[in-house]
Amino acid sequence: MAGEILQKFVSYHVKAAVFGDCSRYTSKPLRDFIYESNKGKHFFFISSREEAVERLARAE
């Protein structure tokens, strides 16, 4: 379901970032999802607000 939601972000050219400490999540599927999301240009999981703003500003 999360993949389908993110596909909507990509389809409608919406960029978003979630910031916070994701290191405490140990689920392999979730870690893979975060990794793959961070490789894209529309949706990011970032550790700080400042970094999230910077990544979103650079994303094209």
Image (spheres, rainbow, N blue to C red):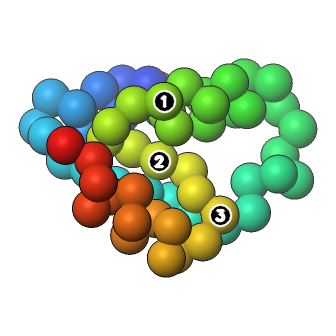
| Res. 44 mark | 2
**Is residue 14 found left or right of 48 in the rendered image?**
left
Q: Quadrant of residue 11?
A: top left
Q: Nearer the viewer, residue 1 or 11?
A: 11
The residues bearing labels 1 and 2 have C-alpha atoms spaced at a distance of 8 Å
The residues bearing labels 3 and 2 have C-alpha atoms spaced at a distance of 10 Å
- In percent of width and height, residue 31 lies at 73, 32
Q: Residue at x 83, y 32 (%)?
A: 27
Q: Amino acid at mark 1?
A: Lys
**What residue would you read off at disc 1?**
39
The residues bearing labels 3 and 1 have C-alpha atoms spaced at a distance of 15 Å
- In percent of width and height, residue 10 lies at 22, 32
- In percent of width and height, residue 26 lies at 88, 38
Residue at the far bottom in the pictured view: 50
Position of residue 53 relative to residue 15, above or below, is below
Which class describes the residues within 10 Å of circle 1: few (<14), some (14-19), or many (20+)? few
- In percent of width and height, residue 35 lies at 62, 31
Q: Residue at x 49, y 76 (%)?
A: 50
Secondary-structure class at tag 1: helix
Position of residue 14 relative to residue 36, above or below, is below
Q: Residue at x 51, y 37 (%)?
A: 38
Q: Earlier in the sequence, mark 1 or mark 2?
A: 1
Q: Quadrant of residue 33?
A: top right
